[in-house]
Image: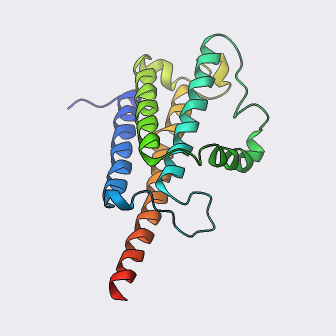
Amino acid sequence: MTTRSEKETLLLNSDIQFNSLLEVVESVPSRKRSMSITTQERDKNFRDVFMHLYEWHSMLERWYREGMDGDMPFMPAPGYKWRNIKLLNLQIWENYQDVTLNQAIRKLKLSHERLMDLIKLHTNEEIITKKYYKWTKTSNLYSYFAANTSSHYIWAIKQCEVITSSIKEKETNKLVK
């Protein structure tokens, strides 16, 4: 029996969680997938969740590109510090209100594949060794990739399950009336 490296586990878990996320959305009839729910939360529909993930993928790609070019990327984004992440996430939400769900799905699938390709470029040692790359500071590539793929997908699945339940509940209530 062979054991998986952290890199292999990261790739596998990322794909499993990503596919689980898509399955949650696909459990809703296609004509209802663009519905928004009433909630105090920022994300009111699948598009909102998908574009949030997409933008965080894009930020990671920028950090990676700048870092691998020898620069110290500004994180999380220009004009934002980690302590005001809620403001950044709200700005992301506002930026993508005109995107359709189909566009969001396409963008997210492509950005997911790009991140998987970046992970594949590295050895297990490069991924798990802290301070291997100067731009990751005291951390490692693994933490950046996991936070923006498998771990973020788990959060997104929970968000989408709430949206799915609300959509299905609305439909049940319509049938009962």
The vertical placement of 71 against 28, above or below, is: above
Can you see residue 130?
no
Q: Residue 37's x, y, as percent?
A: 52, 67
Q: Nearer the viewer, residue 118 or 87?
A: 87
Q: Residue 164's x, y, as percent?
A: 41, 64
The vertical placement of 119 against 145, above or below, is: above
The vertical placement of 160 against 5, above or below, is: below
- Relative side of 131 to 54, left or right: right
Q: Residue 75's x, y, as percent?
A: 71, 31
Q: Residue 45's x, y, as percent?
A: 50, 58
Quarter of the picture containing the N terminus is top left
- The residue under the point 37% across, 89% down is 177
Can you see residue 119?
yes
For the image, the number of numbered tags is 0
Q: Nearer the viewer, residue 169 or 177?
A: 177
Q: Residue furthest bottom?
A: 177
Q: Nearer the viewer, residue 33 or 80?
A: 33
- The residue under the point 64% across, 17% down is 67
Q: Quadrant of residue 119?
A: top left
The vertical placement of 151 against 173, above or below, is: above
